[in-house]
Every structure is written in structure tokens, then in C-alpha cells.
Image: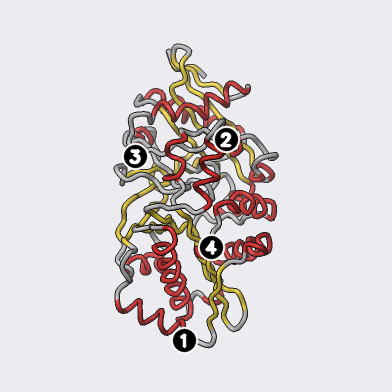
Amino acid sequence: MNMQDITVRRCESRADYKAFVDLPFRLYKDDPSWRPPLKMDVHQLIAGPKTNPWFLHARAAFFLAERGGRVVGRISAQVDELVLENMGAGTGQWGMFETENDQRIANALFTAAADWLRQQGMTRMLGPFSLSIWDEPGLLVGGFDLPPTVMMGHHLAYYEDLVTADGHQTAKTIYAYELPIEEGFPPAVARIVDFAEKSDRIRMRQVDKSRFDEEAALILEILNDAWSDNWGFVPLTDAEVAHVGKKLKPIVYEDLIRICEVDGEPVAFMITLPDLNELTQDLNGRLFPFGWAKLLWRLRRPQVSRMRVPLMGVRKTHQSGRLATFMAFLMIEHIRRASVANYGATRGEIGWILEDNKPMLSIADVIKSKITKTYRVYEKAL
């Protein structure tokens, strides 16, 4: 499509995809809070089913906006069969939106994405998701001064106005909370942890990396059950479980992942990751020729200032009972201790959390954490 001097076209060639991946490195070069992603990871995310099993149940189109032969914006449009099953027929998605501060560019990108989604039979567009809800959901609308932690999105402040001016309405708000972790939690939490530690029904253990595939499958089985009633939930397939496990294995540390059993049944888990953005910031997106060796060395015993809890969950059969609270705080406290003692961390981030996830909002409040980042997912009729 062409909008006066702005042209939007679909990525077709290797050079197109390189331009798609490279664009943020120019747009964010003066943003001190941006943390460059590893370009190899982004290429693998969008390349197709050989590198991302999401494409086994989804399809996507990637678009570049150009002006005067220069790339000035990008966007993805995607249709996920599992989204259609879980969020309703006609629900298409968009993501990976990056642009110069020009409403005409933004409008042209959204028009291209909307046209493609209509051709796929979609009746509404929801986003941003880059590419799925398990990757980077939502547009950052608050907390631009704090760098993102590992696997969290970061955007330029003017994007919100560009999105809303194109007619997109808020569908859901998502929060990231942060708290100091060097000191212990409030006395009420300490009492809960003490009770949980003494309970003869609850057993907590570290993940066993020597049985990594088995442990990953167990955790993601609990996750699919625990999150199945959440807004936007899409189950992870067996292929995605294997892919996620392979991707996370190098950054899995046994003392940062806990599994809780009740009467011998695994029913809860909590995953914590060191903020790897602190370890890759100076690589500028490149692992070669020397970045790979640097990263491997740093991953041997990472020392970071922040930890992130991306995932925790309790099977639905236990979510309404007191034991769920006991297990949650037990895992949080023991991982807090390990984070401080073994990784030098001083702060922790819990995120992301849906605005209506009352149990998680309550936990965040009890441990005296504060909202540091706000993300929004938008919708628009097609």
C-alpha cells in the first residue's frame, strides 16, 4: 500500500527480515532505558516453524514502512488457531510495532496489518503480542525510566498516542511490580512461611536440572492448568514446551525454581530468572564474534541487581484453599534468600500481572511491592 510518500510492504527477502530486526536499534539508540535484544533470538522468533513451533498452529505476516527508500516502521499481523479457540472466532492479533514519531506511518502500518487480518477472515485486531501472549504482551504506557527486565517489553513513550489515535481501545491492563529483597518480608509473611515449613502436607523442592526435560514438562503442565481461566490464556503445545525448555535451560538455576507438592502431588511452581538484560546490555544484540564467549562466562555464576518472577502457578484444584497462600509465600521467601545470597540481587520484579488477577495482586500488596511498569493490550474492530 502507498500513503503519499509512505510505502508499506510485506517482508519477503532475507534483507527485508534483517531490516525488520534492525529497526529498533536505530529508533532506541538514544533511549538509556532500552536493552537491546539478541538479534539471533528475534530472527528465530519470526523465521517460521523450524525455529519457533508457534508457527505450527499460527501464521503471520511482517510489514515494513518506508519513506524515501528508508525503513521507518514495522508491524506484524498474526492469526493463531489456539487464540481463535480460546478467545473467540475472528480474533486476529498484531505486534512487534516500532515506528518513527509520525501518525501517518503508524496509520499506514495498522492499515496494512488490518487488511491482512481481514483477508484471513478476522473481525477484530488485538495487540500488541510479539508474537504470542507467552512472548511480550502489551504496550508499555508507564515506567519508561526503568530498564526492562529479561523477557519484558520496552517501548517509546509516543507509541501510546499513535496507537490510540488510530482508534484502538484498551482491552486489558497489565502490571509489573518491584520490591527490595535484601531484607525479609513483613512479620505476617514470616509467620505464613514458618507455618508452611512446618506443615507435614507441604513439601517444597528445587528443580532438578539433571532431569530437565521431565521437570520442564511438569512445570508447564501445572502452568497450563493454573492459568487456563486467565484472560488471554493460550495453552502451550508439547512442541512449545520442548522449545521453551531448550531455550531456558542455559539460564535455569536450580535454587531459583521451586516446585511444591501437597500430599505428594506436584501442584505449584515458581520460576525466577536473573535479569539477563544486565548481562547482555553491552553486546548490542550480537553474540558473534566475541559476545557468545562473554555471555557464557557471565552465565556461569551471574551477579545481577534484579531478579524477575515471570511465572508461578497453582493447580486449580488447590487455588481456593489456604495451602495455595502458604505455598506461594514459601516459594517466594526461599527464592528471595537465594537471590540475595547467591546472585547479589537487591530488587525483585513480579510480572506481568493482569489487572484483575486478584490473588496475585494481593500477594504483591502483602509483600509491599509497588507498580513500576504498566502495559496495555488494545483492541479494534475490523
Q: Amino acid at mark 3?
A: Ser
- Distance from label 4 to label 1 (Cα)? 28 Å
Tell me the crowding category of disc 3: few under 14, some 14 to 19, or many 20 or more residues within 10 angstroms, Cα based: some
Q: Residue at x 48, y 80 (%)?
A: 323
The crowding category of the residue bearing disc 2, from other C-alpha atoms within 10 Å (few below 14, some 14 to 19, many at least 20), is few
Read off the residue under disc 4: 227
Secondary element under disc 2, as helix, strand or loop, is helix
Per the image, label 1 sits on a secondary structure element best described as helix
Measured Cα–Cα span from mark 4 to mark 3: 31 Å
At mark 3, the secondary structure is loop
Can residue 161 be seen by looking at this rendering? no
**Residue 211 seen:** yes
Q: Is residue 263 left or right of residue 140?
A: right
Residue where numbered disc 2 is placed:
40
Residue 362 in the figure: left or right of residue 9: left
From this view, report whether residue 280 is shown above or below residue 88.
Answer: above
Report x, y in % for residue 251.
54, 52
Q: Amino acid at mark 1?
A: Lys
Nearer the viewer's eye, disc 4 or disc 1? 1
Q: Label 2 amino acid?
A: Met
Kindly identify which residue carries mark 3.
33
Q: Point out residue 314 in the picture as x, y percentages from the top left corner.
A: 52, 70
Residue 75 in the image: state x and y as whole percent.
50, 31
Give the mark, 3 or 1, whose residue is nearer the N terminus: 3
Residue with the mark numbered 1 = 198
Q: Are marks 3 and 2 in contact (CB under 8 Å)?
A: no
Residue at x 56%, y 57% (from the top left corner): 252
| Foreground disc of the pair 2, 4 | 2
Q: In the rendered structure, which amino acid carries the disc numbered 4?
A: Trp
Q: Is residue 343 left or right of residue 290?
A: left
Q: Which is more N-terminal, label 2 or label 1?
A: 2
